[in-house]
Every structure is written in structure tokens, then in C-alpha cells.
Image: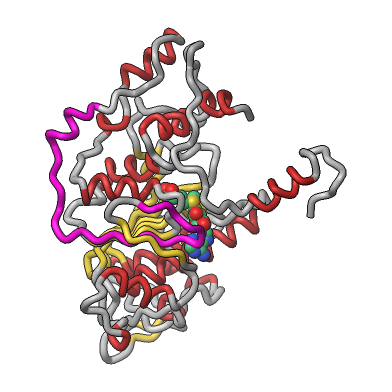
Amino acid sequence: MGKSSKDKRDAYYRLAKEQGWRARSAFKLLQLDEEFNLFEGVTRVVDLCAAPGSWSQVLSRVLIKGEKIGRAGWEDKQAKEKLELHNQTTTTIPRREQEVKQQLQPRENVKIVAIDLQPMSPLEGIVTMRADITHPSTIPLLLKALDPEIFDHTSVQASHPVDLVISDGAPDVTGLHDLDTYVQSQLLWAALNLALCVLKPGGKFVAKIFRGKDVDLLYAQLKIVFERVRVAKPRSSRASSVEAFVVCTGFRPPKGFKASLENPLGAGTQLQVPESMRTTKTPPSRTLRPDGITELELGSGDEEEGKDIRWIAPFLACGDLSAYDADASYHLPKDHVVLDPVQPPTAPPYRKALEMRKTAGGAYGKTKLG
Ligand code: SAM
């Protein structure tokens, strides 16, 4: 796909470059925030799988600089209509900088930590860490980055300073649907377990999911640890993709629950099932202990039990209907200038392949790749 063609076919890709976002994903977070008011009362945030950093840019602008980036801040309906109907005029969307400046409300004591396997170019006010979110050693590193002074290795369990954990984790997609879904779900579990270890009671968790066959079981498990669980599809996420986001609010660690990466989600034992999820029918394998904790084997494969704990999360499409459609192509004016990406990848996994191809004299060179 040519550069100009990509601008035409992906309005959010083009818009991201015009507005200085490192990736089009910024709009997904903005549209989720529009619907769920994610940043309300939030000062400590962990951004997982953060590179190249467009979600961190949103956090930096909203929490550190105090900008209010509502829909008016990133989209101009009129400009869109001009593009669609007249196929002329400029594609540059006004940033309304004056308006934004007047609304600046920086927050105090903001702490944002961004983690990714890939190196990430620095961003104002954000602590960036190169680490694997599936590795247990990442949690103490993260807690130390959040609070170097009060951090104490012995009290990792006791330290829950975070208001919001967001995760846009995605593996390098292979195109093999089952494999991609599986690897993505492993990333989601890692993100959730990490969130359970650092979130404050009442905290929020937002993560990318691929809606696969057993996704309702995931919703049920999330509902055990969060008061409200919603599934959301921002308008900037292509309708044709299985991608969606779980938005979980009101973290309520179940009685007796101890978060640990070695024993994720309590490994299916000793979770207290909230009242809202109990049914009158008690499956035979479930036992109520004298201390009020219901022991429940999650994912044991027992059909009857599975039926009992499944819970379907409400699904919401978010982002205004007048926002760009991620699946549509838009006309561009004849004098459209194709901008370079704001932040090219610092160490893309495909770099080696590109170098090999160059050495081989192009795509049709004599040297075979891999
Ligand atoms: N939210 C980012 C933004 O707005 O710029 C985009 C994230 S991108 C879709 C997915 C990221 O997940 C990649 O940068 C990848 O390196 C990261 N990732 C995948 N597996 C990871 C892991 N185990 N630990 C940390 N990061 C991981």
C-alpha cells in the first residue's frame, strides 16, 4: 500500500500524523475516555505494552499538562464533511490550541510508568521501562519506578498505589487466528495479574482483548475482581477486527485474595464470588467455608459449573457516530501532503529482515531470506 493510499484508507492513521500522535491507537484511548471518563480522579497510571507511546502521550497531555482533549480537541466535524463531500480544501484538522490552553488544569503528584519490550522514545513526565510484562521481576521494578522512596522489596504485596492500569498489548500478529488469539490472551492475563498486584481498591483496568470463543469466561473472571466490567469497541478500531477493550472499574480484591504473578488470579481457588454472580443453584464442587469464602474452581471444564459462573458483559460501541469510520476510505484533496509518521519504531522486529533484503538487492534479489 502506498503512503498516500494508506492516508486515504485509514483516516485515523492520517489524523494521528497531523495531530502529532505516535500511533493511531491514541484515538482508541480518547474514545474510551469519552465514554467512560477513565481519567477522572486518576494520578497514578501504568501503561503496559506502551510503545511507540501514543497512549502515554494521551496520559501526558491529560494528566501532566492538564489538557482536556474532548472530541473537539481531536476532531473537527466540519473538516471531515468538507473532505467527504467536496473532495477539496485542506486535510489539516485545526487543533484549537487557544481553546485547549484556556482549559489547562495540570494535576498534582502525577506518576506515569510506561512499559514495553521495545525501547520507547522519551516522553515528558513519563517513566519508561523496557521490560516483559509476563515476567514476575517486572512488578518490583514497576513499584520502584512509581515510588522509589517508599519502595521496600519486602512489602511488594502491601503496596497498591495505582489508580489505573491500561494495556494495549498485542503480539506480532502471525495471521494464524487461533495462535494470535492465544498469544494475545496470555498478554491479557499478564496485564491483569500485574494490575491485581498494583491497583488500589476502587482502581480501574482497561485492556485490549480479541473476542474469541470463550471470551465470556474471561468477563466472568474479571467480574469477580471488579465491580463493573464492560466491553467497548471504539469507532477508531476497525469493525472488521476482533479487537475490543475490557473496561473494568471499582477494583474490589476478594476476601482472602492475594495477588501474585506466581499464582495468577489465585490460580482458580479461594475466590469469593460476589453476590451479584451467585445463583440459587450451587454446583457440587463449590464449598462455602466458615469464614464466608466460597471456594470455586474456575475453568475446571465442568460444564455445569461453567454455566453457573458465566456472565455476559454489556457491550458498548464508543466514539461519536460522526467520528471517522475506521473501515471507510476518504477522499483526499489533490494537494494532499503525505506526512511521515511522528515516531518511527526505534527497534522494530522487522529491521533485520529489511537489512537482509537490502543486502540481497531488494525484494527480488538473489539471496533468500530466512
Ligand atoms: N498503546 C501503544 C501506543 O499507543 O503507542 C501501542 C501498543 S502496540 C499495539 C503493542 C505493543 O505490545 C508493542 O509495542 C509490543 O512490543 C508490546 N508487547 C508485546 N508483548 C509484550 C510483553 N510481553 N511485554 C511488554 N510489551 C509487550
User: In the visual, does 163 lie left or right of 353?
Assistant: left
For this orientation, the residue located farthest to the front is: 359
Magenta segment, which residues? 96-122
Please indicate, yes or no, whether residue 28 appears anywhere in the rendered image. yes
At 49% from the left and 68% from the top, the residue drawn is: 132
40 is higher (above) or lower (below) than 157? above
Please indicate, yes or no, whether residue 284 appears anywhere in the rendered image. no
User: In the visual, does 120 lie left or right of 321?
Assistant: right
149 is higher (above) or lower (below) than 244? below
* Picture quarter with the N terminus: top right
Name which quarter of the figure residue 18 lies in: top left
202 is higher (above) or lower (below) than 359? below
Does residue 115 belong to the magenta stretch? yes
**Residue placed most toward the observer, 243 or 143:** 143
For this orientation, the residue located farthest to the right is: 366
At 64% from the left and 50% from the top, the residue drawn is: 350
* Whole-percent x, y for residue 281 in the image: 39, 73
At 47% from the left and 33% from the top, the residue drawn is: 13
132 is higher (above) or lower (below) than 244? below
* Whole-percent x, y for residue 349 in the image: 61, 54
**Residue placed most toward the observer, 312 or 260:** 260
* Whole-percent x, y for residue 180 in the image: 61, 56
* Whole-percent x, y for residue 301 in the image: 56, 73
Name which quarter of the figure residue 276 lies in: bottom left
Does residue 4 belong to the magenta stretch? no
